[in-house]
Image (spheres, coloured by chain):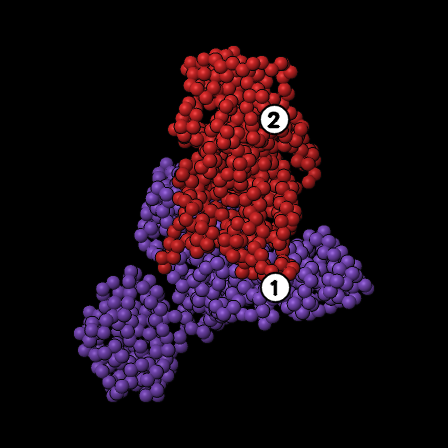
Chain colours: A red, B purple
Amino acid sequence: MRQSRSFIPTMREVPSDAEIKSHQLLLRAGFIRQNTSGIYSYLPLGKKVLQKIEIIIREEMDAIEAVEVFMPAMQQAELWQATGRWYNYGPELFRLKDRHNREFALGATHEEVITSLVRDEVKSYKKLPLTMYQIQTKFRDEQRPRFGLLRGREFIMKDAYSFHATEESLEEKYQDMMRAYMNIFTRIGLNFRAVIADGGSIGGTGTHEFMALSDIGEDTIAYSDSSSYAANIEMAEVNVAYEKLSEPLKKMEKIETPNQKTIDDVASFLEVDASRIVKTLIFKADDKLIVVLARGDHEINDIKLKNALGATVVEFAHEADVLELLSCRVGSIGPVKLPVDLKVIADHAIASIVNGVCGANEDGFHITNVNPERDFAVDRYEDLRFVQEGDTSPDGKGTIKFAKGIEVGHIFKLLTTYSTAMDATFLDENGKAKPFIMGCYGIGVSRILATVAEQFNDENGLKWPKKLAPYDVHLIAINTKDESQNALAEELYNILKSYRYDVLYDDRPERAGVKFADSDLIGLPVRITVGKKASEGIVEVKFRQTGESTEWQKEELTEKLQAFFGME
Amino acid sequence: MRQSRSFIPTMREVPSDAEIKSHQLLLRAGFIRQNTSGIYSYLPLGKKVLQKIEIIIREEMDAIEAVEVFMPAMQQAELWQATGRWYNYGPELFRLKDRHNREFALGATHEEVITSLVRDEVKSYKKLPLTMYQIQTKFRDEQRPRFGLLRGREFIMKDAYSFHATEESLEEKYQDMMRAYMNIFTRIGLNFRAVIADGGSIGGTGTHEFMALSDIGEDTIAYSDSSSYAANIEMAEVNVAYEKLSEPLKKMEKIETPNQKTIDDVASFLEVDASRIVKTLIFKADDKLIVVLARGDHEINDIKLKNALGATVVEFAHEADVLELLSCRVGSIGPVKLPVDLKVIADHAIASIVNGVCGANEDGFHITNVNPERDFAVDRYEDLRFVQEGDTSPDGKGTIKFAKGIEVGHIFKLLTTYSTAMDATFLDENGKAKPFIMGCYGIGVSRILATVAEQFNDENGLKWPKKLAPYDVHLIAINTKDESQNALAEELYNILKSYRYDVLYDDRPERAGVKFADSDLIGLPVRITVGKKASEGIVEVKFRQTGESTEWQKEELTEKLQAFFGME
């Protein structure tokens, strides 16, 4: 493509309303423009990257026999009413009426549409499993659109849905998808992790998120430094073998600790390590009070607590309830001599505490040399705490580290949530009607564009990985008025195109400095500059990723390029 | 693709709500499903055809240096207010509000968005011309959605926009687009005509429609039987050399014609040919009355009349105005002895009438042997009538015939309509601000899917042209329980895939009759059936277009297929 005929409006200044690198650079390099809050136009360079992402996704979906469809954006309200989401999706769902006053949702996702489609056409287990996907614009009225394409109101997604007769079949497809997603993100070139995740509001069980590692990510991932283990911090198991100190058990002692309220206060006042303190909390789990113990240096993960108790809602007990129960404030609770009908659940780490410290159930006092079993009873030990950096990885391999991540993909087992709500059933081998067992699988296509830009850049601009670059080669003639430069540039342009390279040819009558700055900003993998040595058939070649530059004879160009881009 | 893993829900019955062949067949063959009135899902086969259409469009757009972009569906109301279309587009424009109560249009078209984009980024004539296109979902709330994909409320379009510094540059791009469109529709395999068209409400001048010929088309095309001339009947010029009869002029006679009101009445009552009658009409052109003459066998085309008079609105005069002016009814008007201040405009054919008949400006009477010039004056002769079948083609080559057409493409010169309204200017060579000169160019992508289905079918189903077929080959094993049939089918499936054919492999455990019926319905170009002669390595090959069938040895399969599909 001749740059003079394309639409690549670059900017020197950093746009004031763009907070993060990818947003700034995609604007500055002319990949996107904002139309209004959270709504963007993809300019030619942005559109080309999207297409490269889509090709990779299609190839990997096809490989696992998912078939492509295209469903409408306008979805009649009745569908969303059937699953109840019309009422509880909230203001994120764009709604509108047609000329006959019929209500519609603008597709935020397509579970309802595809479930109704399959319900109406698939009657027998013989037609299962069935996996369909689409690449399509989605609409969500985010309260606070931000970070450019990372959180927009109109964005492009690949969403896939699978329908099964059995959970085994779903599990098989889920593993297919897992592999396909790993391939997709690997081919794209992202630095990412597949992360064990919580189902969130969509109501699935057994889900993985695919997280691109990035400091600006909104999620924290706990991962192993020496295996593929990774989990959303909220879901990461703790699997640590705590060593019990071998010191002799000492006698309990009640000690005055005036105004020492926090764990840190108490630790420094008593000159003990926080890991010796028995943090004692009272939770209300579905209206029942329960005592929860964790080491002073650990944090309770209430999702784990909720799951361990099989409770629907878990929250801190009210101060007033605690006062009534124990006649002391929250900061002074301890597990010693609690009312007998009060159940105690403790994190595994508590079992290894020797001569610990806890609250005395009396304001202003703590007890030292407390030992579990001897001094207080625990009804159950469970994994209740958040994982920490430095913990052993739950798979036993390596040590846990934390990273921030941007969610670029998500796979869910929906099971029968939607099929039951929409009365979508098939006849099984015995002629019995059963709800379809479903999975759903998303990839944020436009979000990937921004995420890659976020991971691959330097102070001069973007640095596209080869597979995703809008063009392979940036061809530049330094002086378009110089006949031999022009002739060589035109010749190379035609040769490279004939070798099927995607070439952006900067034929603009601009100064060399402008062309180089734009070229760095745009960030194609290879820049070929035709300059003063044109008459000798020599060009300068610069690699954007490494910054290396060298000179090539025009005769060796295609062979060397082929070596650089690989043989695929 | 294994058919058992795809989603191709075929139907034997004709859906009662589908009026036309293409709609019935696309539903029956499992290409599409309706979600709600005018809104469809594209199932795997439909989506594949869309993709093949899109690839052809992209290749031809790229070839004329149009660059692809992707603009949003949600368009802030302010843009549409700037051009006034927010107020006059009517209920066809879907409108909605976001959570902050800001108003949006759902993109029915993108002139506003792209004009604002270019206005904000392109400041100089040096960046022009610039041509951008996108392939995208459009939303229009049609009053009466019908004919399946032909008139829907959510549909897929390719829309392109060009920006120029001069009209010459626009003309050049318009001709590029004309060629690209001819290539696109030719490659797709449509039976179509490029047709001179009226600009319609979008406000352009100099426009062509691309009409696929079809009896169910809503437009009538006048075309030459021996040249490429074609025009929308509303725009077709008449360029006929009328021969004047050489009979001697007779004396005018006033004759009683009681109750003879229409041209046909008078012609048969007086036993003259309708072509001898001077049809006399009174129009109101922008509040001024004018007499319009045409031959009795011709129809006045009011668009031509409007253009000839340079009027904004042209309509029939009210009965009461005629009565007041001439003291007779509309059916009795004639050009003889009219009030002197009344202007008379006549179609060219009038000049050749000899001894004609006209109304006497007195109810119940006509005048015979009327001759122009001798008996009545004509201020201007113009081309005012509709073209007729049998007329000489305006380009002088051949004879006019009529056909019905489905509009599949449309190219417009918008000139400065949008740029002026949106204050979108560039600086010309002299540093003077000028509004961009624009063109816009549309193709109905999803409409093409239906139009091809309408043109290519028989009583058994669809008959896809090679370039658009969702798959190249339908491979069928008659008896999937027969080991040698199964083995050969699997072998051929893999061989054909390795030769890069798109193969639909019917591996379903269905009866042969069901498979053949489905195969005819789906309509792929080649069907390869593995049956009883599998053990001899012989398959049956049937061509959907011609119905011919033959037997091939498996060894000769790829070579013969290559010959059938051509070498491209």
User: What amino acid is labelled 2 in the image?
Assistant: Ile
In the picture, measured across the screen, residue B1 lies left or right of residue A119, that is: right
* Amino acid on which disc 1 is placed: Ile
Name the residue: 45% across, 21% down.
A361
Q: Quadrant of the N terminus of chain A?
A: top right
Q: Nearer the viewer, residue B127 or A193?
A: A193
Q: Chain of mark 2?
A: A
Across and down, in percent, residue A430 comes to: 64, 61
Residue A140 falls in which quadrant of the image?
top left
User: What quarter of the picture does the C terminus of chain A occupy?
Assistant: top right
Residue B27 placement (x, y as % from top left) = 54, 64
Q: Residue furthest right?
A: B536
Residue shown at 58% from the left, 59% from the top: A433
Q: CA distance from mark 2 to mark 1?
A: 55 Å
- Is A147 above or below relative to B391? above
Q: Is residue B125 visible?
A: no
User: Along the line of sight, which residue is nearer the eye, A62 or A200?
Assistant: A200
Q: Residue at x 22, y 82 (%)?
A: B363
Q: Which mark is residue A346?
A: none
Say how many tags the image has. Answer: 2
The answer to whether residue A416 is left or right of residue B368 is right
Residue A400, numbered label? 2
Residue nearer the viewer, A499 or A535: A499
Residue B57 rendering spot, x and y as whole percentages: 54, 52
State the residue position of label 1: B522
Can marks 2 and 1 be said to lie on one chain? Answer: no
Image: A520 above or below B302: above
In this image, A223 relative to B561: left or right?
left
